[in-house]
Amino acid sequence: HLFASYNNNNNNNKNASHWVHVICAKWQGLGFIPDSKQVIENVTELKENFLHVLPRVSCMLCLGNRGAFNQCPEPGCNKWLHVTCARAAGTCKVVHGENCHGPVEKDGWTLWCPEHSNIPEEEIPEGSLSIDQLIRAAKEFPPEPEIPPPKPRPPKFIKMTGKERRQWLGDPEYEEEFLENLLREKFYGVKCEVCYQLGDDSGMMTRCVGCDVVFCDACKYEGDGAVKGRDYLCAACQYVQEKEKENNNDFTLPQCHMCFQPGGWMRKSFANPVNKKSLKYTKELTNTYFSKDLWSHALCTLWQFPTISVDHATGMVDCSNVIMSNGRGHILGKPKCGLCGLNGGLKIKCDEPGCRAFGELRTPFHFHPTCARQAGIEIDTMPDVESGYYRFYGKCFVHSSCAFAFRAKLEDLLEIAKKRYGKRLQHIEKLSMSIADASRLLNASILVMASLGWAWRWAEWWVEFGDNWEPFLEPHEDESKMTKEQLRVVDSTKESRAEDARKSRLGALGAALRNRNYDDEEGDAYGTLDRALRAILHAKSLVGPLKDFEIDFFAEWLGRAYRSRSRLLGYTDDKILVSEKGYCVHKEDNSPKNELGKRPLPGKQELPEGEVFEKGIKDIDDFLKPETTENGKIITKELIDSTKPKRKMVKKPGRPPGKKHGKRKSNWENVSKEVAEYVVEDEIIPKDDEAVIPRKRSPGRGKKPG
């Protein structure tokens, strides 16, 4: 016996084993699955053939209709037999297709019925079974499990009507195959994972066949070795492939040292000590960034330009200027990422002047570029007039522009469909959908769902500050002459936003998406997820006053984006590591915000028709709670003002270099004018009668003045 794979949709035991005789497999032309000598290829199609195509066929010896049969080759003979019955009866001529010498040249894999075998009675082997014995043995077997009739072949996608599209895309097998084809073969609607430029199928994009990262021609270097076609492997995939060929199981998968996002487009990197004298012994380099094989995301690299440089010819990234002198950390790596809450790696700060991170006294909002990109907050480029190059910048949730508001992302997604099917999608049932449009809709939906997967974090900011959404106007519309209803403006307060977030269970949904809880036994990636998404789409202060056809459209495509399992969603294996303390846990019980925990799965509750919000559920959250520091101290205006400079020192003489750093009373009248040049402006003076004079790096070891 050998194990065989078998798709039986009516079998309640999905883990049941299926076995097949070796001789039966050989006589039906079955082979082994790739890389296995123990498992026979899938027998479903073979069994469907005998059940549906030849439903009246049965073995002429045992009269059973279970299993597979072989037909007598005699012209005009319609008798069928089990090969095992033919051998057991001894009355049939059976020619096996191979023997100890190799393949049989004549009549291989052929058997004849008793009538056309003409085997004399004296030549029937001793111990052969009679017809009655074979019939009794066949009756002991249970009947063949019923297999559903084969599905009709779907028409071409571009020829389907709206009703046919919903029917076929509602089939999990067809939808899975269709979505995989869009994600692996098409570039319509795909954005470069570095510069975020929108791509198409014009040939400006390159995709790695190993990890599916996509980047544009403008972001690649000569050393990246990027070529057009289907055989390109990024540097990280090449590295893994080489290690696997060497049977090296001890290697570490490439991971960017500047952030905590797994995967993505990475380049090989290195770091050398800037001051080699600071490392007295060679052993001090062990287990430091100076001795490791480093990798850097292209995204992280560009947003640290020009501190980090790339050799265009080799593609190697020089990170020497961002590694501390001891090689065990990053320079300026202390501020926490406002999204993942972790200290490590390299972060950028909000580009808005005067930005103060929520929960901090004076510190601006800092974040990893990869965290910001996945969460959907603004991280972009703009032309720098002075230098003539592009400037790479980022902004926090509060200061992100309108285009990065959650509602704006939904409107951009809807606009793709409106261009083809009308402003009210009135033609969506009649007109076909091109592969290009489907690809654009899917990729835009993935970006919306990726942002929604971080709602466990940004929901608090949205409740506290709202967003920067602006009305989406047609070319002929004048905002000054339109009413709020026409502009679809929704007035909201902190309290109303908190109510919408709680009713729709915004934070809990973000946690459930991040961990793909709808794939669990408790969840359902269709009905349950659909109800959860519709609750979000009825939160007017978040998504605006949507019409029913808009809600139906969003629920369909956002659910489809979840089921696509795109790595750009940032769920499960692709999610970014987050902190287990600080702002990433609830203040009340320190439970992780990024996990459901004791909270029920959003959408699990089946509701009466016409209702969208679940009843009787009170999720834990930090909405409308006083702003506090990480150690729990309530932040007030007085506390913030107390950390500001009290007065400035402008053009006043200071201590000559060489003296020890310390405090002294102000006595400017007795200080020589020769040392005035060493005083630094805009320094904090803690007390009116004391001055803390900061250190200033001296230009050299000259004589002490004065």
Image: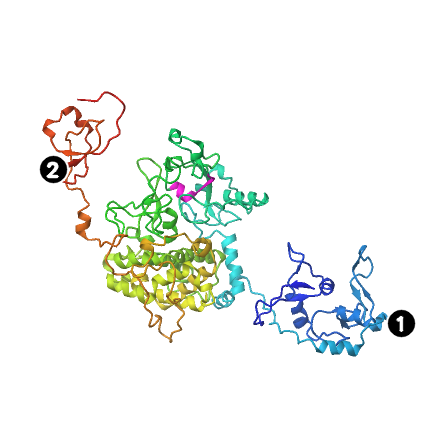
Does the magenta segment cover residue 296? Answer: yes
Are there few (<14), some (14-19), or many (20+) residues within 10 Å of tag 2?
Answer: few
Is 161 displayed left or right of 680 in the figure? right
Secondary structure of the residue carrying numbered label 1: loop
Are there few (<14), some (14-19), or many (20+) residues within 10 Å of tag 1?
Answer: few
Q: Is residue 569 above or below residue 649?
A: below
What percent of the width, then of the height, locates residue 442? 45, 58
Q: Quadrant of the C terminus?
A: top left
Residue in front for this viewpoint, 502 or 213: 502
**Magenta range:** 292-302
Does the magenta segment cover residue 692? Answer: no
Query: Taking the image as drawn, is residue 212 in sight?
Result: yes
Secondary structure of the residue carrying numbered label 2: loop
Is 106 displayed left or right of 294 in the figure? right
Q: Is residue 241 above or below residue 548?
A: above
The quarter of the displayed image where residue 276 is located:
top left
The numbered mark, 2 or 1, whose residue comes first in the sequence reads: 1
Residue at which label 1 appears:
120
**Residue type pointed to by label 1:** Pro
**Residue type pointed to by label 2:** Asp
What percent of the width, then of the height, locates residue 680? 20, 32
Q: Quadrant of the N terminus?
A: bottom right
Residue at which label 2 appears:
689
Residue in front for this viewpoint, 113 or 554: 113
Question: For the point 37% across and 40% down, which residue is it?
Answer: 330
